[in-house]
């Protein structure tokens, strides 16, 4: 069993999840607080990766980060290497691809926090930012956990975007889903089966954790904690 | 600089318009915004708190402009430094009682902050609950914690929105008794929204009656209850005769009250000797003339008819007996008894028809 692709997938998912907390929490916070009329446009853009085929998203990302593009050439000039078919390129693509899986649970948990609590904090003199961090965030922990776990799992499981943007470079972009595809292509069914089983068990554990965290009544835990 | 809260706002919703104008002194005193639900009381309070923005108008506090639609000014709630307290207490559930009270006390050092929290905890008698989180508190305890949190930052004005309505009956009665005493040391003006007559009579000094987004009457409690400016006000407040009295003693469950030089007997309910507001509905008063026969009514008052006015099938007779009392009688009774302004009249009221409201 070659563990490198699995480890690479885990590394990618960890980096992407961390980035999604950094980007997703403020974005969801803004979406929950903003009264801008054009807010729906941002919501629609964030949700796009859910409906678009990964190939379409991958194609656009590839075009956007190619050395011919502004972003791609800027990156090439600054870091001396190109974004497509690199780990950094994969991180960027996966972050965009998993964005809705982080932002939507974050947003729905922020919005389910009783507005009266925020209003109480505002009247007490706390700024909107302080209120968000001290009142809304602590009350949204299950949503934050769910968003993180879903982004992590979704990144582990992605295939199309990774293939288009990252290709299949061992140690750099050859993640676990692509290695399974490779094994099947090479008729190495036993190896493909082992890796698939590991991925299946992993995904099951992740989803079980999400449902457990979100369970309202949990007999094992003390009530009212 | 005028020491007042100037409110002159208009806010529209589909099919509904709220217009409110008032000048409230901001030194002290309790003003009741009274009205049926849907009269716009809560919206007015939320506009004053800065949680809603009126469509048009001015809000000024001690010369500080909080809202001015013409100049495009709006002060956010954070900068108004007022207290806002609602029936659905929004304590922060993941914080303890002490952490809730000390949540936002800007400008205080850590030591001062701790002192302030300790002071509020002892003032509101919350020592035993200090480290509890709000889901483990009873309704009345939550209410006290929220009030302590509101007052901890020394607001300049206190807004209370139906502060007691979410509580069960015994807790409500208990807190109603304590509320004025708890807030008194802070010496701030209070604006309280309620649709509860007892709450207004117990807590208020001044009363503004609202209906369908408009102010119907603005005056002292006794004025509004005893001299409603319209039938609608009388309907809303539901008690025509309200006057101050002194409860002098309680014997055998009956309270003895001195009011306007007359003595009254009422059933003593949760009242102690001291100042009270006395309330009697006009339809509970029987008018007597000439040599009055003995009746079971314990209260006999004597005075002179001051006014007679016709109201559909009934007649409202105002009798001056040291204080003015309205009685509602039928037209037939008016003719049979030959009642006219200037005539001597006696009034009979059963002890059970006299309602007492402790008033400081």
Image (tube, coloured by chain):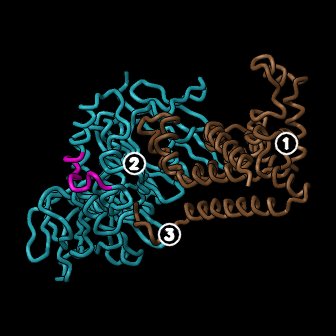
Kindly identify which residue carries mark 3.
A217
User: What residue lies at 49% left-to-right and 32% top-to-bottom?
Assistant: B59
B291 or A162, nearer to the observer: A162
Q: Position of residue B354 (x, y in %)?
A: 25, 69
What chain does mark 3 sit on? Answer: A
Check if mark 1 and mark 3 are on a common chain: yes
B306 or B208, nearer to the observer: B208
Please give left or right for residue A156 compared with residue B2 in the image.
right
Q: Is residue A23 above or below residue B242?
A: above
The magenta stretch spans residue B128: yes
Check if mark 1 and mark 2 are on a common chain: no
Kindly identify which residue carries mark 2.
B85
Crowding at dot 2, Cα within 10 Å, few <14 / some 14-19 / many 20+, comes out as many
User: What residue lies at 25% left-to-right and 37% top-to-bottom?
Assistant: B114
Kindly identify which residue carries mark 1.
A168
User: What residue lies at 88% left-to-right and 58% top-to-bottom?
Assistant: A184
Q: Are marks 1 and 3 in contact (CB under 8 Å)?
A: no
């Amino acid at each position: 069993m070659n563990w490198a692709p699995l480890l690479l997938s885990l590394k990618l998912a960890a980096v992407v999840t961390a980035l999604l907390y950094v980007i997703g929490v403020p974005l969801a916070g803004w979406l929950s607080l903003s009264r801008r009329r054009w807010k729906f446009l941002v919501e629609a853009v964030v949700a796009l990766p859910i409906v678009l085929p990964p190939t379409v998203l991958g194609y656009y990302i590839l075009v956007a980060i190619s050395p011919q593009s502004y972003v791609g050439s800027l990156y090439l000039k600054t870091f001396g290497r190109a974004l497509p078919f690199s780990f950094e390129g994969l991180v960027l693509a996966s972050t965009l691809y998993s964005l809705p899986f982080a932002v939507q649970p974050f947003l729905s948990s922020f919005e389910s926090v009783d507005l009266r609590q925020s209003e109480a904090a505002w009247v007490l003199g706390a700024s909107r930012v302080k209120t968000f961090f001290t009142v809304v965030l602590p009350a949204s922990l299950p949503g934050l956990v769910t968003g993180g776990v879903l982004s992590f799992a979704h990144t582990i499981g992605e295939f199309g975007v990774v293939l288009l943007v990252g290709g299949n470079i061992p140690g750099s972009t050859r993640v676990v889903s692509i290695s399974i595809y490779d094994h099947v292509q090479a008729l190495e069914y036993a190896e493909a089966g082992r890796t698939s089983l590991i991925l299946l068990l992993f995904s099951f554990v992740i989803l079980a954790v999400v449902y457990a965290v979100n369970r309202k009544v949990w007999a094992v835990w003390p009530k009212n904690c | 600089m005028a020491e007042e809260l100037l409110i002159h706002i208009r806010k529209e919703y589909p099919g509904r318009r709220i217009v409110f104008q008032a000048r409230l002194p901001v030194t002290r005193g309790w003003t009741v915004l009274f009205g049926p639900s849907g009269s716009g009381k809560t919206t007015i309070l939320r506009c004053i708190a800065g949680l809603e923005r009126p469509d048009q108008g001015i809000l000024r506090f001690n010369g500080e402009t909080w809202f001015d639609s013409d100049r495009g000014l709006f002060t956010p709630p954070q900068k108004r430094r007022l207290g806002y307290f609602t029936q659905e207490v929004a304590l922060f559930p993941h914080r303890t009682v002490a952490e809730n009270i000390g949540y936002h006390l800007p400008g205080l050092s850590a030591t001062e902050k701790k002192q302030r929290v300790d002071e509020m905890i002892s003032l509101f008698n919350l020592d035993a609950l200090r480290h509890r989180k709000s889901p483990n508190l009873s309704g009345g305890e939550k209410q006290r914690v929220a009030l302590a949190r509101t007052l901890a930052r020394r607001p300049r004005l206190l807004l209370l929105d139906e502060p007691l309505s979410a509580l069960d009956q015994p807790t409500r009665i208990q807190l109603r008794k304590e509320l004025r005493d708890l807030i008194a040391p802070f010496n701030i003006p209070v604006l309280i929204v309620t649709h509860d007559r007892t709450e207004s009579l117990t807590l208020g000094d001044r009363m503004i009656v609202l209906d369908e987004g408009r102010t119907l009457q603005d005056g002292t409690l006794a004025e509004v209850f005893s001299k409603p400016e319209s039938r609608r006000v009388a309907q809303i407040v539901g008690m025509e005769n309200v006057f101050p009295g002194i409860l002098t003693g309680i014997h055998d469950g009956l309270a003895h009250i001195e009011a306007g030089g007359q003595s009254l007997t009422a059933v003593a309910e949760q009242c102690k000797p001291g100042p009270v507001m006395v309330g009697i509905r006009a339809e509970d008063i029987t008018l007597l003339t000439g040599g009055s026969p003995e009746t079971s009514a314990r209260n006999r008052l004597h005075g002179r008819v001051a006014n007679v006015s016709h109201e559909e099938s009934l007649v409202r007779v105002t009798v001056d007996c040291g204080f003015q009392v309205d009685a509602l009688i039928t037209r037939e009774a008016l003719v049979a008894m030959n009642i006219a302004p200037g005539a001597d009249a006696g009034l009979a009221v059963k002890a059970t028809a006299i309602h007492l409201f402790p008033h400081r």
